[in-house]
């Protein structure tokens, strides 16, 4: 799914994402940046598990390789305010419930989750 997202992302958005990743670059430590750090940490943990005297049943819990996102493309989920939600309900969306506010979000407007199943 991630590769499809990249393929359908505009060049301008990809350039912004690339700039954000470059801004994370640090001159110290594992891999030089946040992404490199996570990858290096995973590799180190994997090496520790391989070297540990663990039974085979415990080693299987170590994640290996690519784990695809599990989703269905035929369900559309939107989080909107009540006014926008009314318009979505006219389009067939079902109101699922109120979304808890993020303490870091300056907006205090109530938001609701709307779901459209069997979306094209």
Image: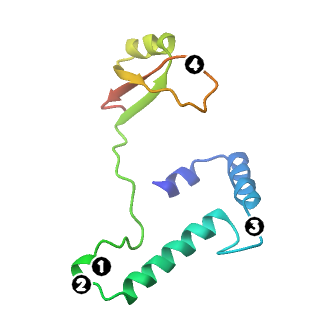
> Which residue matches tag 3?
26
| Alpha-carbon span between mark 4 and mark 1 | 46 Å
Q: Which is nearer the eye, 44 or 2? A: 44
| Alpha-carbon span between mark 2 and mark 3 | 38 Å
The secondary structure type at the circle numbered 4 is loop
| Alpha-carbon span between mark 3 and mark 1 | 33 Å
* Position of the C terminus by quadrant: top left
| Alpha-carbon span between mark 2 and mark 4 | 51 Å
> Which residue matches tag 2?
55
Residue 22 image position (x, y, % from top left): 74, 61
> Which residue matches tag 1?
59
Image position of 17 with respect to 51: above or below: above
Tell me which residue sits at (37%, 42%) in the image. 73
Question: Which comes sooner in the sequence, label 4 or label 1?
Answer: 1
> Which residue matches tag 4?
108
The secondary structure type at the circle numbered 2 is loop
Image position of 25 with respect to 90: above or below: below
Tell me which residue sits at (35%, 27%) in the image. 116
Circles 4 and 1, Cβ within 8 Å, touching? The answer is no
Circles 2 and 1, Cβ within 8 Å, touching? The answer is yes
């Amino acid at each position: 799914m991630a590769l499809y997202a990249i393929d359908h992302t505009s060049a301008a958005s990809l350039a912004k994402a690339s700039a954000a990743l470059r801004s994370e670059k640090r001159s110290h430590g594992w891999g030089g940046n946040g992404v490199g750090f996570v990858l290096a940490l995973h590799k180190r943990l994997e090496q520790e598990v391989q070297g540990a005297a663990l039974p085979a049943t415990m080693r299987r819990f170590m994640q290996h390789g690519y784990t695809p996102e599990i989703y269905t493309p035929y369900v559309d989920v939107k989080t909107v305010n009540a006014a926008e939600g009314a318009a979505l309900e006219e389009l067939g969306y079902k109101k699922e419930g109120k979304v808890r506010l993020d303490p870091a979000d300056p907006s205090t407007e109530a938001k609701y989750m709307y779901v459209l199943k069997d979306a094209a």
